Image: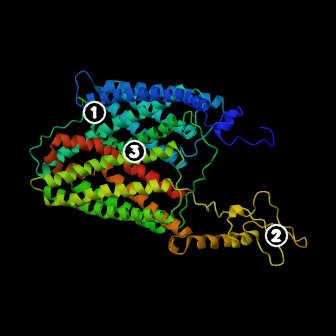
Amino acid sequence: MPEGQRAPASPQAAQSAGIESPESPALRRGAVCASVPQKLAEALSSQYGLNVFVAGLLLLLAWAVHASGVGKSHLLCFLTALMLLQLLWMLWYVRHSSSHRRLIRLKDTEAGARWLRGSITLFAVITIILGCLKIGYFVGFSECLSATEGVFPVTHAVHTLLQVYFLWGHAKDVIQSFKTLERFGVIHSVFTNLLLWANSVLNESKHQLNEHKERLITLGFGNISIVLDDHTPPCNCTPPTFCSAISQGVYYLYPFNIEYQILASTMLYVLWKNVGRKVDSHQHRKIQFKFHGVMVGLVLGVTVLAATIGVVVVYLIQIGRSKTKSESALIMFYLYAITLLMLMGAAGLVGIQIYRIDEKSLDESKNPARKLDVDLLVGTAFGSWLISWGSILAIFCAESCPPYTWYNLPYSVLVIVEKYIQNLFIIESTHREPEKLSEDIRTLRVVTVCTGNATSLTSFSLKRGAVAGDVTPQGSKMPPAVNGNTCLREGCGKEEEERSREGALGPACHPRFLQGNAKRRVLRNITAFLFLCNISLWIPPAFGCRPEYDNGLEETVFGFEPWIIVVNLAMPFSIFYRMHAAASLFEVYCRI
């Protein structure tokens, strides 16, 4: 547009001038047409991934129920083929990226945080150790196991190594070339990891169920038939002690393998959502981890962690030994969990109240990583809520309840309430704008004309009631220097700015102990405490401390098989919730 010519004030004026307005139908039609291929590619790739996932789940179900004609070798062949296909795609993508490394690639700064990649690396190392144990198990039972049971752990170990390398180098990528092909490759990787996760969950659940059936008789439930279903190979292992040790060690490593697969799935899902995405140039501030000022939260959290380990050890030792010891173990667990959940709920309420007092604007920008975190928090909390409501219903509907089951009522209620409060606290924290001064009073650089009394422009403007953005209106000139004494000072209006802000807000709006660094210290202590508490609550169900199995009340009300199905479906989501909540709280801590 030529200089001096004013822009049309309305869409109608723009059309009369021959200029397409942003609101014109032609541009709207062009935007819609441009988005159609992307939406179609997303729909095609997502439907492909869902079909792969459904086929794998049916194979898992068929093997679990001993369907005729379906053996473990068929399931492992399918999973191995999926992993090999993903390996080919990752190798192609890495090679393609390295050949175009000089090109400027868009990055999503919110995706693939360094601490997240570090966590997945730790879980991947344990997963590789698990694979080595499975190889040893195959060698011991090689006489009666198919070759697929030896090929699968080797392929899984190679798949794990390359996938971690891929996520370290490309988790932040915003793919803009070969978009349709990349969408299929990434979504294939997502559902491959989900199927590997489901396979691990099924194996671990079978082990827990077998132990549960053996313990039920000690609580007086003799009418339940105990039929073990462990798919033991029909031959002897050589040497027997070696295979027995491997079998026990494998199930203690499954929780870490489960977390690895689900973390890999979430990181790959964010990569899939970022394919073809338009990323703005705004860079979020660098996340820093500091220990300063969180001694109270750390001490309380470490105390909770140590106490949890002690409770789990005592529970696993006493449960199943006798009816009296089993009941005392259940009472101990319920009392400890009730106390911990009350403390966590109170801490979350204090954090939410601090945010409510703050009244800072929320960050409503769209981001796939943050949206996925929130969806996973709410979605996986459903597992615990399902079990808790089942327990509450069973307590009120049972004809007779042993004394220890009444501790289950406050425990189940607190599980629901605590997760509700914690989700609100995490969502509130992740949607907060970074700590910065308000736009109305922020002054980055103040140029001061030093006269005899050194009066600053900021002070002069504030006395007149002007905001910082109006200190120097457009087109105005700075006052001339007096006697040639001119100096440049940065931030010299800081004290006046703070005073004006306190005066504008009023002393009653923000309590003094919740202002500035004091507020951040309180929030950091709360976040550190909740972080360690969630890790503590991840430990009991992950390592076999599951009162939902052992109290026996729900099984008498709902029936053994229906309740076991509910627990086996909901428990993996409950376990994942605690680890995901801990990861989200760690990110919140680094942002405060």
Q: Secondary structure at mark 3?
A: helix
Find numbered disc 2 in the image and state the secondary structure of the residue it sits on.
loop
Q: Which residue is mark 1?
A: 237
Residue type indicated by callout 2? Val
Rendered position, 357 above or below 389: below
Left or right: 398 as drawn, with respect to 142: left
Q: Earlier in the sequence, mark 3 or mark 2?
A: 3
Which type of secondary structure does the marked residue at label 1 adopt? Answer: loop
Q: How many marks?
A: 3
Q: Residue at x 9, y 53 (%)?
A: 399
Residue behind mark 3: 256
Label 2 belongs to which residue? 449
Q: Viewer-proximal residue, 133 or 358?
A: 358
Task: Judge depth for marks 1 and 2 and give the one in front.
Answer: 2
Q: CA distance from mark 3 to mark 2?
A: 64 Å
For the residues carrying marks 3 and 2, which lies nearer the camera in this image? 2
Q: CA distance from mark 3 to mark 1?
A: 26 Å
Q: Residue at x 50, y 39 (%)?
A: 270
Q: Earlier in the sequence, mark 1 or mark 2?
A: 1
Task: Tell me whether the residue at label 1 lies in contact with that at label 2, contact meaning CB atoms closer than 8 angstroms.
Answer: no
Residue at 23% across / 25% down in the picture?
A: 67
Of the 4 image quadrants, the one containing the N terminus is top right
Q: Residues within 10 Å of mark 3 (few under 14, many from 20)?
A: some
Asked if one can make out residue 552 in the rendered structure from this viewpoint, the answer is no
* Residue 176, image x, y percentages: 60, 31
Residue 353, picture quadrant: bottom left
